[in-house]
Image: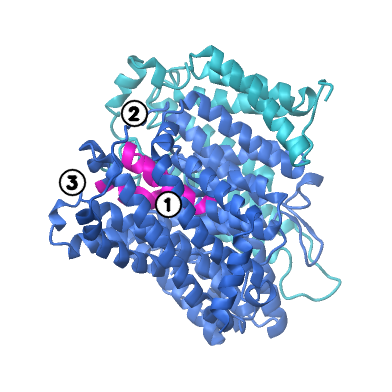
Chain colours: A cyan, B blue
Amino acid sequence: MSGPTTEHPGGAPSGGSARRARRWNPLSPVAPERAFRFSPRTLGVAIGLFALGYLALAFQMPDYTAVSVPVQPSTLPRWLGVALLILAVLLFFQRAPEEEAPAGPAAGTAPGSGDASPAPSEAADGGAPGEEGARLGRLEDPRLETGLFVAALCVYVALFEPLGFVLSTALYLGSMTWYLGYRRHLATAAVALGLPFALYAGMTWGLGVVLPSGPLPF
Amino acid sequence: MGMLDQLLHGFSIALTPQNLLFVFVGVLAGTIIGILPGLGPMSAIALMIPIAYGMEPTSAIIMLAGVYYGAIFGGSTSSILLNAPGVAGTVATSFDGYPMALRGKAGKALAIAAISSFVGGTIGVVGLMAIAPSLASFAVSFGPTEYFALMVLGLTAVVSLGGRNLVKGLVAAVIGVMVALVGIDSQTAIVRFTFDLPELYEGVEFLIVALGVFALAEVLVMLNRRGRGGARGGVTSLRLSGGELRRITPPTLRSSVLGFFTGVLPGAGATVASFLSYSMEKKLARDGDTFGQGNPKGVAAPEAANNAAAVGSFVPLMTLGVPGSGTTAILLGALLVLGVQPGPMMLTDNPDMFWGVVASMYVGSLVLLILNLPLIPVFAKVLNTPKAVLVPLVVVFCVVGVYGLSFSVFDLGLLAAFGAIGFLMRRNDFPAAPLILGLILGGLMETSMRRALQISGGEWSVFVTEPISAGLLAVAVLSLLPAVVRALRGRRRPGPAAPAPAAEEEARDRAPTPRG
């Protein structure tokens, strides 16, 4: 199921970016409130496609014939697929979320300002990166920033075993902390070098959980 | 006889130096993680599970319970100091806590929060002791049919109370159950949805999903917000006068009781409890119109209620083995991995664990109080952790947690994928709790559905002819009604609330599509 699941996030943004491309130049930065928010239609289509793929697999599933069982292994998946399809249709016909009053400003899941009106904070946020210290990352567009972050995570995961835990983690921590804009480089270096080693020591010698050592000799 | 002896026995377990240490570690870690903006009890527990894996089950659950109420308290700290609740359960606290902090009474507000949390937690534990044994002895008679209905109820309750959008909640729940079905089917050994990847034969480890959908997604949301929403908060004197204590006593006591019973109900966790008690006290208080402007009662009430509810939510978890909230679902997942199946038999089969946990809750509340009052200024410094440092650190902890469990890089990829999914869900207002609950209940649901049908000889009607099961399913449908009504009133939608068709079909349908 990881296949369809991983295809899901891929599917959703591609539909969304097509829609975005109509409305804005995709190269122009987008306000954080708006990044990765899709209309119910896009979501409905993405989830519906996923449900169809899931159903196709569920109906290809072999039946268990050795003994007669009331519930075949494919029974529940088929219902789930149908249910998801119905829900996707319902979602498709939902109206786009109306403007929510900013009840919890900046807190938790502050509802974005939808698609209707450009958020007033866009200019302030994208145009004038005033408080550089408070801002994470360097790119104008939060979509690219998030993509880069996920890519960095994938690189980290890919290097995890070849380089070993200590080296790959030190590399990841150091580069990400620096990239995200923490400017006390000495502290960055201390954390990036000290923490992986401490974690490695704690896990390997303390808890008996062996992390990959890579080229390091311990 | 019984109960007091058993409680004493529980204390003898909870007070062993080792377990005492674990309570301490749990509460401390929970508080620190809970203070960090964005990371709530679910992320806190998920992050601590890898540490719990190597431990003895009783110690592990004692520690994780400590993490839970530590995280709730930590959330109220960031609510009060930053007006940035890390957890939905402490949103109500910020209504009066933040105004108090603005008026230079942050210390007082934090002290009130600590004290009323303690009272709420303690009253909750008393309630847990009183209710759990009788509920468990009632639930012993439950068969697979009843369990199936109960799990459906748990899912629909979490969905209906979890978010504004019923359809999105249901989508999350269905996808959760779908993820649960990946792997080799336990009954027939048929491989499902693995795409011939041997890594998936064992199914998807719930910790991967929990860390991805909560902790990692949270970090991505932080990044997407460009790290805004953080400010400096100073702490002032913590001292409360006798008059202030007297003023907050009645609301604290009332809210504790209300919070506990709200917590026991499936789906209605700390969040609902805190809002209920806040509005109740606002109505009851003579100075109700000053609520929202920094009234201490407005801090005491939700804090007492959310802690009592956190304890209350242990009742269904420990006696029925069915979690009533996202957080207890994660706890259940942890217990299952540790080889413990909570349920009505736990009280008789594994009394050490039950009473040890109960006793450790008393101890935990106390530790929370003595730890927090002096350390509040220190904790407040945690809020100043630069996000640029915090974000990569959380990622590393997630990676270590997953790798330490499965030693598989494939699972790390899965973690990243679920992080992305969780992020997209968060950005589009899909609640994550139903997904986790669906994932954990999915396998159990299918098993009990099969057993029920095996017993009934394949008669699907068994779910609606058994009185308890029928009642539970009816409540499950009813629990979705308010959300449906809200949806219909708010916007025009092609009727999601079709009247129930043939009862038999409906009973089957309800698991995947619990629509009223």
Residue drawn at 62 percent across, 38 percent down: B398
Compared with A165, B132 (above or below) is: below
**Disc nearer the start of the sequence (2/1):** 2
Q: Are marks 3 and 1 in contact (CB under 8 Å)?
A: no
Tell if the residue under mark 3 belongs to the same chain as the one under mark 1: yes
- Residue holding disc 1: B369
State the image coordinates of residue A166 (x, y, percent, origin top left).
72, 25
Q: Residue at x 59, y 41 (%)?
A: B212
Is disc 3 placed on a helix, strand or loop? loop
Q: Are marks 2 and 1 in contact (CB under 8 Å)?
A: no
In the image shown, does B413 or A191 lie closer to the viewer? A191
User: For this rendering, which residue is in front, B121 or A101?
Assistant: B121
The residue at the point 48 percent across, 77 percent down is B130
Q: Which mark is residue B430?
A: none
Residue where numbered disc 2 is placed = B232
Q: What residue is disc 3 on?
A: B293
Considering only order in the chain, which callout, 2 or 3, is on the residue closer to the N terminus?
2
Q: Position of residue B465 (x, y in %)?
A: 56, 86
Marks 3 and 2 sit apart, C-alpha to C-alpha, by 20 Å
- Crowding near pointer 3: few (<14 within 10 Å), some, many (20+)? some
Q: Amino acid at mark 1?
A: Leu
Q: Is residue B343 magenta?
A: no
| For residue B219, side relative to residue A32 (left or right) | right
Residue B87: in magenta span = yes
Which portion, as a residue range, is magenta?
B67-96
Q: Quadrant of residue B144?
A: bottom right
Q: Under tag 2, what secondary structure?
A: loop
